Image (cartoon, helix red, strand yellow):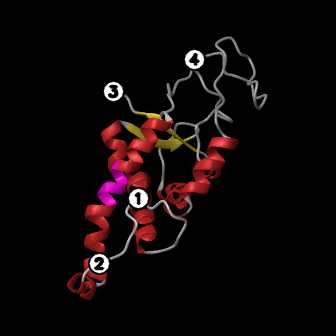
């Protein structure tokens, strides 16, 4: 299955031009062989990451930053990060995804599910691109996801995937 290099639209096999953006389609088969990851795979990877962040990473960071809170009990975070807020959980999540996807192209959840984030042209991520892509996931997930589902269903992109010009693809198995 081939996708447009410019907009990510799924192309008919005999297309010479993308029906979505009008860009010329290369007559040679796609050298990248990218296959988009499904929304289900992406959500499962997010949930794995949320569990890792909520039960391991954020408690450790909280203990180092606020040791007295560990003694009196309770950190009061939302480990799924579903809310649109700017607390410690969100900042740590942002740093986690920026580092993991900027350096490795994958978070731990994506590694488990054998998917990764790449630029729309198939090139690897860098830290700056990962930071832009991670903003929506860490701070504005409901808005990011809903707008992406409405505006970019063909490329299966969240809003901040579109802004950072990235896609989530299956890795070679």
The crowding category of the residue bearing disc 1, from other C-alpha atoms within 10 Å (few below 14, some 14 to 19, many at least 20), is: some
In the rendered image, which residue does mark 2 sit on? 74
The mark found on residue 80 in the picture is: 1
Q: Is residue 98 above or below residue 154?
A: below
Q: What element carries label 1?
A: loop
Q: Mark 3 points at which residue?
A: 173
Please state, as top left, top right, bottom left or bottom right, where the N terminus lies in the image: top right
> Is 32 covered by the magenta stretch?
no
Which sits in the foreground, 52 or 24?
52
SS class of the residue under badge 3? loop
Could you tell which of marks 3 and 4 lies nearer the N-terminus?
Answer: 4
Q: Nearer the viewer, residue 158 or 74?
A: 74
In the image, which residues are magenta?
Answer: 48-53
- Mark 4: give few (<14), some (14-19) or many (20+) Cα within 10 Å: few
Q: How crowded is mark 3: few (under 14 residues within 10 Å), some or many (20 or more)?
A: few
Residue at figure coordinates x 32%, y 49% from the top left = 108
Q: Name the residue under label 4.
A: 29
**Image depth: mark 4 or mark 2 in front:** 2
Marks 2/3: CA–CA distance: 42 Å
Counting from the top left corner in percent of width and height, residue 133 is at 54, 54
Q: Horizontally, is 89 left or right of 25 in the view?
A: left
Q: Distance between the residues labelled 1 and 3?
A: 29 Å
Q: Is 51 a magenta residue? A: yes
């Amino acid at each position: 299955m081939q996708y447009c290099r410019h907009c990510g639209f799924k192309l008919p096999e005999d297309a010479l031009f993308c029906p979505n953006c009008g860009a010329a389609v290369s007559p040679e088969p796609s050298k990248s062989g990218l296959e988009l990851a499904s929304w289900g795979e992406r959500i499962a990877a997010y949930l794995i990451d949320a569990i890792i962040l909520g039960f391991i990473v954020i408690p450790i960071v909280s203990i180092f930053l606020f040791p007295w809170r560990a003694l009196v009990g309770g950190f009061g975070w939302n480990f799924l990060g579903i809310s649109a807020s700017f607390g410690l959980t969100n900042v740590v999540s942002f740093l986690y995804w920026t580092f993991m996807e900027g350096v490795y192209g994958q978070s731990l959840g994506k590694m488990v599910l054998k998917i990764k984030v790449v630029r729309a042209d198939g090139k690897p991520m860098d830290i700056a691109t990962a930071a832009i892509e991670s903003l929506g996931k860490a701070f504005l997930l409901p808005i990011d996801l809903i707008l992406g589902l409405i505006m970019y269903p063909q490329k299966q992109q969240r809003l901040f995937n579109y802004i950072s010009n990235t896609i989530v693809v299956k890795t070679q198995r």
